[in-house]
Image (spheres, rainbow, N blue to C red):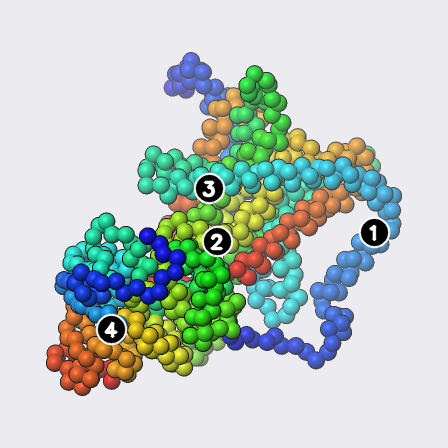
C-alpha cells in the first residue's frame, strides 16, 4: 500500500520522504514527540512557577513582591531566544566541567533539559501575572461574605477563592498552552531535534522544502487545534451555570 | 443651508405646532416600546413626560431627532417630517438639542472645545465668535471658570451643565432632556434643575423626561403621563398631580409621592 | 470619572533622602550584586577592555535589530489596517480570506514563518529591467510583519470599538455628520487607546528580531557570537551573553513601561 502511495506521490512530483524513508520518518516522529514533551512539560513548570510567584506577589512583605516583579519584568522584556542562549551558552559554560584533564566536557544538563528549563521559566513569567490576576478577580465582597460567616482564611482560600480563581484562569492557561507549543520551535537554536529542527534536516537532505513546509504547518496547526479543543472541553466541564465571570 | 450666526429662529410650521407626533410605533426585538404614541407641543411650551421605566419616554426623544428610526406613525418637528425617508437628519439635529442621562461629553476635548466643536464644524461659525458665545453660555450655567478644564476633572453635575451649554451653542429651537438628573447625587440635582429652569425661562421649547415630580410640578406647562408606550393622560400639572383622571396615573403617583 | 476626591499617599515623617538610605532586603541584594559585579570587573580588566573594543560592531549589530523591528512594525500596521477593514466588511469575499489569513499567521510559530519567507522569497527580484538583490533581513522583516499584522488588525478594531456608542450619539445629536464624527470625536479617542497596545506590539516584534541571528543575519547576537568564537576564551561567554541580554532588556523595558503609563493616564472611559 505504501508502494502505491509512493508511486502516486513521486509521479506527481511530491517528495514526502517522511512517509517512506525510515530515517526521515524517525526524525519527524522524534521531532513531534519532543515538541509535545517540551510543550506540556514547560507548561507544567510554568504553572508551578506561576503559582509560587502569585503567592509571593500576595505577600505582606515587600521583598518577595519585588523579587517576583523583577523576575517577571526581566523575562517578559527580553527575547526568548536570547534567554535560551544566555542559559545554554552562558550559564551552561559555568556548569560544565572536565572529568579528567583533556577529556570532553560533561554538561550538567543536556540541551533538551536547558530548553525545557528556559521555556518553563519564560512561560512562568506570564503565568505569574495570569494567576495573580485570576486570584485578584475574585470579588472582595465574596471573600467578605465568607469571612462574615466565620470561615477561617485557610478554608476561605480552599473552598471559595481557589475554585473561582481556577475558572478565571482558564482562558489564560489555555492561551499559555498555545504559546508554549509555538515557543518550542525556538529550541531549534540549540540543536534540540524537535519538529522545526527535524524538518530543517529533512529538507536539507532531500531538497523538498515546499512539501516539508506544508507538513510542518499542518502538524503545528493540528497540535494547536487539539490543544484548543482539549482546553475548551475542560472549560465546559468546569463551567458554573449562570455564572458569567466577573 | 448653513447660516453663520442665527438667532433663535422659530420658523412657522405647517401645522402651527413645534412638535407633532401621531400614532408612533416602535418595537425592539419583539418588545413594543412605543404603541400608538401621540402628542403635540407648541412653541415655547414646557412639557414634562413622566411614567414608569420602560414606558418608552427615552425612546420617544430619540425618535424625535432621528437617532432611532420608527416602525410606524408620523413625526413633525419644527416643520420637518422626521419619518420621511428623505429627511435631512443633519438639518433636523441642528434644530434640536438632546441632553443625555450620561452627559456624554467628549473626554479628549476641553470644556470650551466641547462647546465650540459643533458650531464651528456644522454651522461654520468663526472660532472666535464660537468661543465668545461659549463663554457666555458657560456664564449662564455658572461654570465660566471651568472653560479650560477637561470633563474628567468635573463632577457629574458640572458635566451635565456643560452638556446643556454644548447643546445651547447650536441655538436650537427645541431642547430635550432625557432623565438628566437620574445619575447625579441629590445635592447636584438641584444645580442642574436650576439650569433647566433658566433655559425654559428664556422661551425655549422644552421636552423634559424626568422622575423629579416636584420639579415637573413647578416648571411644566403640561405634564404627560405615559405607560406601556402611549400617553395615558395629559394635563397642566396642578390638575394632573392633584386630580389624576386615569387609575393608572393615580397608582403611579401614589407609588412615587 | 469623578476625580474631585483623591486619596493622599501615606507619608512617613522622615525626609526624603533619609528614607532612601534605609536598608530593605531588596536594596541589600542589589548592593551585594553590584559589589560582586564590581569585583569581577576589577579582576578581569583585560576582558572588559576587549569587550569595549567590540562595542562599535555590537552597536551596528543592534541597529540591524532595531531596523528590522521598525520596518516590520510599519509593514504590520499597514497590513493590519487593511486586514482589519477587510474583516469587518460585509462582503464574504473580503472578510473570509482576511480571517483565514489572520488565523493562519497567529497560530504559526514565528521561526517557521521566517523560514517560510526565506525559502519563498527569491534572493533577487526583477523590477523594470534591473535586478534588485533582496537581502536576508527583508525576508525576516516580512515574516515578522505577517505574523504581527494579525495583532495589529485587532488593535485597530479594538480601538474603534472601544469608543462607547454614547459618544457617537452625542456627536450625532449635535448635528455632526459621519465623517466629522469620525474625524473629530471617535478617531482622536481611538488613536489614544490604540497607542499603548501598538507600543506593546513594537516591543514584541523587536524581541522577535532576535530570531534573525539564526538565519545568519549579522545582528547583535550573531556579532557577539562571532567575536566570542574568534577569541575562544570560556570566561568571556557569560559576560558576552549577559551583555546581549541586558542590551535588549534596557531597550525594551522602558518602552514597555511607557506604554503601561500611557495606558493608565489616557484611560478615558472606565
Q: Quadrant of the C terminus of chain A?
A: bottom left
Q: Chain of mark 4?
A: B
Assign a secondary structure to mark 3: helix
Query: Same chain for the residues at labels 4 and 3, yes or no?
Result: no
The residue beneath circle 4 is B45
Percent across and percent down for residue B187 are: 41, 82
The residue that mark 3 highlights is C81
Q: Are marks 3 and 2 on the same chain?
A: yes
Quadrant in which the N terminus of chain A appears: top left
Q: Chain of mark 1?
A: C
Q: Position of residue C231 (x, y in %)?
A: 81, 35
Q: Residues within 10 Å of mark 2 (few under 14, many from 20)?
A: some
Mark nearer the N terminus (3 vs 1): 1
How far is disc 2 from disc 1 in space, using C-alphas?
52 Å
Is residue C82 found left or right of C245 in the rendered image? left
| Relative image position of residue B193 (x, y in whole percent) | 35, 78
Q: Where in the figure is residue C82, as x and y percent of width and height? A: 44, 39
Residue at mark 2: chain = C
The residue at 78%/57% (across/down) is C34
Mark 3 or 1: in front is: 3
Residue that label 2 marks = C188
Front residue of C145 and C217? C145
**Inter-mark Cα distance, 3 to 1:** 51 Å
Q: Give yes or no for contact between labels 2 and 4 (Cβ–Cβ under 8 Å).
A: no
Q: Is residue A64 above or below residue A110?
A: below
Label 4 crowding class (10 Å Cα cut-off): few <14, some 14-19, many 20+? some
At 54% across and 58% down in the image, what residue appears?
A: C263
Q: Chain of mark 3?
A: C
Report which residue position mark 1 lands on.
C40
Q: Are marks 2 and 1 in contact (CB under 8 Å)?
A: no
Of labels 1 and 4, the one closer to you: 4
Image height of C241 relative to C128, above or below: below
Amino acid at each position: 500500500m505504501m508502494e502505491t502511495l509512493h508511486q502516486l506521490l513521486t509521479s506527481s512530483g511530491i517528495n514526502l520522504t517522511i512517509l517512506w524513508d525510515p530515517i526521515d520518518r524517525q526524525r519527524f516522529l522524534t521531532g513531534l514527540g519532543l515538541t509535545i514533551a517540551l510543550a506540556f512539560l514547560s507548561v507544567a513548570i510554568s504553572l508551578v512557577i506561576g503559582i509560587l510567584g502569585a503567592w509571593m506577589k500576595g505577600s505582606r512583605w515587600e521583598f518577595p513582591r519585588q523579587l517576583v516583579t523583577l523576575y517577571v519584568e526581566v523575562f517578559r522584556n527580553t527575547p526568548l531566544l536570547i534567554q535560551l542562549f544566555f542559559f545554554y551558552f552562558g550559564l551552561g559554560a559555568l556548569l560544565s566541567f572536565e572529568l579528567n584533564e583533556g577529556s570532553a566536557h560533561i554538561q550538567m544538563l543536556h540541551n533538551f533539559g536547558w530548553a525545557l528549563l528556559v521555556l518553563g521559566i519564560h512561560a512562568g513569567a506570564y503565568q505569574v501575572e495570569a494567576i495573580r490576576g485570576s486570584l485578584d478577580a475574585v470579588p472582595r465582597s465574596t471573600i467578605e461574605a465568607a469571612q462574615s460567616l466565620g470561615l477561617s482564611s485557610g478554608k476561605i482560600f480552599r473552598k471559595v477563592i481557589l475554585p473561582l480563581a481556577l475558572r478565571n484562569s482558564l482562558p489564560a492557561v489555555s492561551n499559555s498552552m498555545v504559546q508554549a507549543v509555538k515557543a518550542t520551535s525556538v529550541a531549534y537554536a540549540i540543536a534540540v531535534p524537535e519538529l522545526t529542527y527535524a524538518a530543517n534536516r529533512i529538507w536539507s537532505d532531500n531538497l523538498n522544502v515546499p512539501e516539508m513546509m506544508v507538513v510542518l504547518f499542518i502538524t503545528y496547526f493540528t497540535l494547536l487545534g487539539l490543544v484548543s479543543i482539549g482546553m475548551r472541553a475542560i472549560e465546559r466541564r468546569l463551567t458554573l451555570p449562570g455564572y458569567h465571570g466577573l | 443651508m448653513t447660516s453663520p450666526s442665527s438667532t433663535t429662529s422659530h420658523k412657522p410650521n405647517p401645522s402651527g405646532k413645534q412638535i407633532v407626533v401621531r400614532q408612533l410605533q416602535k418595537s425592539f426585538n419583539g418588545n413594543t416600546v412605543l404603541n400608538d404614541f401621540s402628542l403635540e407641543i407648541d412653541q415655547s411650551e414646557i412639557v414634562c413626560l413622566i411614567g414608569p421605566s420602560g414606558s418608552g419616554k427615552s425612546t420617544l426623544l430619540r425618535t424625535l431627532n432621528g437617532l432611532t428610526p420608527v416602525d410606524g406613525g408620523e413625526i413633525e418637528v419644527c416643520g420637518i417630517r422626521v419619518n420621511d425617508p428623505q429627511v435631512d437628519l443633519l438639518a433636523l439635529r441642528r434644530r434640536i438639542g438632546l441632553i443625555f442621562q450620561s452627559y456624554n461629553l467628549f473626554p479628549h476635548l476641553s470644556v470650551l472645545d466641547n462647546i465650540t466643536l459643533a458650531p464651528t464644524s456644522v454651522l461654520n461659525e468663526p472660532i472666535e465668535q464660537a468661543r465668545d458665545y461659549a463663554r457666555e453660555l458657560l456664564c449662564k450655567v455658572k461654570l465660566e471658570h471651568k472653560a479650560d478644564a477637561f470633563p474628567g476633572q468635573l463632577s457629574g453635575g458640572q458635566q451635565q451643565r456643560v452638556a446643556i451649554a454644548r447643546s445651547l451653542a447650536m441655538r436650537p429651537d427645541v431642547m430635550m432632556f432625557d432623565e438628566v438628573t437620574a445619575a447625579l447625587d441629590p445635592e447636584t440635582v438641584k444645580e442642574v434643575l436650576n439650569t433647566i429652569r433658566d433655559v425654559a425661562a428664556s422661551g425655549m421649547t422644552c421636552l423634559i423626561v424626568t422622575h423629579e415630580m416636584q420639579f415637573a410640578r413647578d416648571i411644566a406647562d403640561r405634564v404627560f403621563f405615559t405607560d406601556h408606550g402611549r400617553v395615558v393622560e395629559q394635563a397642566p400639572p396642578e390638575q394632573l398631580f392633584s386630580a389624576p383622571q386615569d387609575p393608572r396615573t393615580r397608582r403611579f403617583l401614589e407609588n412615587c409621592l | 470619572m469623578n476625580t474631585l476626591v483623591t486619596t493622599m499617599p501615606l507619608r512617613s515623617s522622615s525626609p526624603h533622602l533619609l528614607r532612601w538610605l534605609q536598608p530593605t532586603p531588596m536594596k541589600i541584594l542589589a548592593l551585594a550584586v553590584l559589589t560582586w559585579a564590581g569585583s569581577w570587573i576589577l579582576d578581569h580588566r583585560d576582558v572588559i577592555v576587549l569587550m569595549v573594543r567590540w562595542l562599535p560592531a555590537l552597536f551596528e549589530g543592534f541597529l540591524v535589530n532595531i531596523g528590522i523591528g521598525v520596518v516590520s512594525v510599519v509593514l504590520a500596521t499597514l497590513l493590519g489596517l487593511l486586514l482589519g477593514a477587510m474583516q469587518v466588511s460585509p462582503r464574504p469575499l473580503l472578510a473570509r480570506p482576511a480571517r483565514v489569513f489572520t488565523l493562519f499567521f497567529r497560530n504559526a510559530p514565528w521561526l517557521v514563518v521566517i523560514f517560510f519567507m526565506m525559502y519563498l522569497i527569491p534572493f533577487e527580484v526583477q523590477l523594470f529591467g534591473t535586478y534588485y538583490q533582496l537581502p536576508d533581513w527583508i525576508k525576516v522583516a516580512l515574516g515578522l510583519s505577517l505574523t504581527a499584522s494579525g495583532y495589529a488588525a485587532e488593535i485597530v478594531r479594538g480601538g474603534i470599538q472601544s469608543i462607547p456608542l454614547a459618544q457617537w450619539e452625542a456627536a450625532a445629536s449635535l448635528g455632526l455628520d459621519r465623517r466629522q464624527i469620525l474625524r473629530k470625536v471617535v478617531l482622536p479617542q481611538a488613536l489614544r487607546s490604540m497607542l499603548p497596545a501598538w507600543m506593546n506590539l513594537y516591543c514584541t516584534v523587536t524581541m522577535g528580531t532576535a530570531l534573525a541571528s539564526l538565519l545568519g543575519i549579522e545582528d547583535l547576537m550573531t556579532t557577539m557570537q562571532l567575536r566570542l568564537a574568534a577569541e575562544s576564551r570560556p570566561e568571556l561567554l557569560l559576560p558576552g551573553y549577559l551583555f546581549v541580554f541586558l542590551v535588549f532588556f534596557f531597550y525594551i523595558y522602558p518602552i514597555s513601561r511607557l506604554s503601561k503609563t500611557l495606558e493608565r493616564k489616557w484611560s478615558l472611559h472606565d
